[in-house]
Image (cartoon, rainbow, N blue to C red):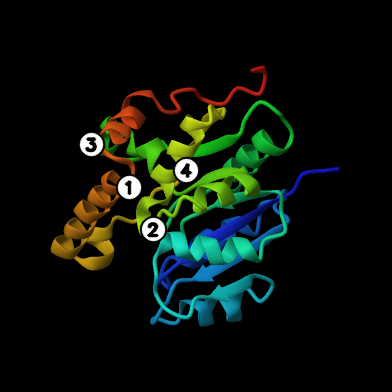
Amino acid sequence: MNKTCGVLIPYQNEKERIADVLDQILKVKNLSEIICVDGGSTDGTSDLVKQKYPMIKIVRMEKCSGKTEAIILGLKTMAADYAFLCDADLQNLKSSEIEYAINAILKNDHADMIIMRRTNFVLTTRLTRGDILYTGERILSKSDLEKVLRLKPVGFQLEIAINKYMADHKKRVYWVPSSAISTFKIKKMGFLTGFTNDIKMIFTMIKYAGLKEFLRQIFFFSHKPYNENRR
């Protein structure tokens, strides 16, 4: 039986950016379904998606509860074996790189998760390994993701919770390079609000995992690039 992969794209107020992401997603040939999850947008993002991309499924949350909660809702509607998690505010996302990452999971049995490493991240982010540890673009089995979600991460704790689960269960995690660039919060919200939200995000991750786990991931998690010949 052939394995399948669907994509989950959570968003909130990304009307100005989401079309660039969806244009690339629609070019990806090895995706079985595309699900967008509206986390409480007020800028008409869902109206844009519905009008411009009628073939894409939209799931709307009743209230704004955060990224993790959006993924929980979207996953309930997903039929695929694997989930590709993708942020909605990316620039320079490339369909060919997504296809390669998905094939790394679907056509081989020696990878449990593939992370799309944002190689164009700024130096300060790369020094703390944020280009791997906290990137939103990653592919893992639906069953593993469901197990992570039972550990009750909230908001932006999702990535560090996935990393911890994978490390604790000795899963095989590799990365592939990605040209995508995230839109920084200071650009979307202004410098002060964006900077404050970045600091809050870091503290909420540490609160979930603990400082020891936070440092363990920085030093030891997923240093290996994907190699299709690895066994």
> Residue 167: x, y in percent?
47, 30
> Residue 196: x, y in percent?
17, 58
- Residue pointed to by mark 4: 162
Q: Which marked residue is nearer to the observer: mark 3 or mark 4? A: 4
Residue 130 sits in which quadrant?
top left
Q: Which marked residue is nearer to the observer: mark 3 or mark 2? A: 2
Cα gap from disc 3 to disc 2, whole angstroms: 26 Å
Q: For numbered disc 2, what is the local secondary structure?
A: loop
Q: Which mark is residue 124?
A: 3
Q: Which mark is residue 154?
A: 2
Q: Nearer the viewer, residue 220 or 51?
A: 220
Q: Earlier in the sequence, mark 2 or mark 1?
A: 2
Cα gap from disc 1 to disc 3, whole angstroms: 23 Å
Q: Nearer the viewer, residue 127 or 151?
A: 151
Specify whether residue 178 is in view.
no
- In the image, what residue type sits under mark 3? Thr
Q: Which marked residue is nearer to the observer: mark 1 or mark 3? A: 1
Q: Residues within 10 Å of mark 3 (few under 14, many from 20)?
A: few
Q: Residues within 10 Å of mark 2 (few under 14, many from 20)?
A: some
Q: Earlier in the sequence, mark 3 or mark 4?
A: 3
Q: Earlier in the sequence, mark 3 or mark 2?
A: 3
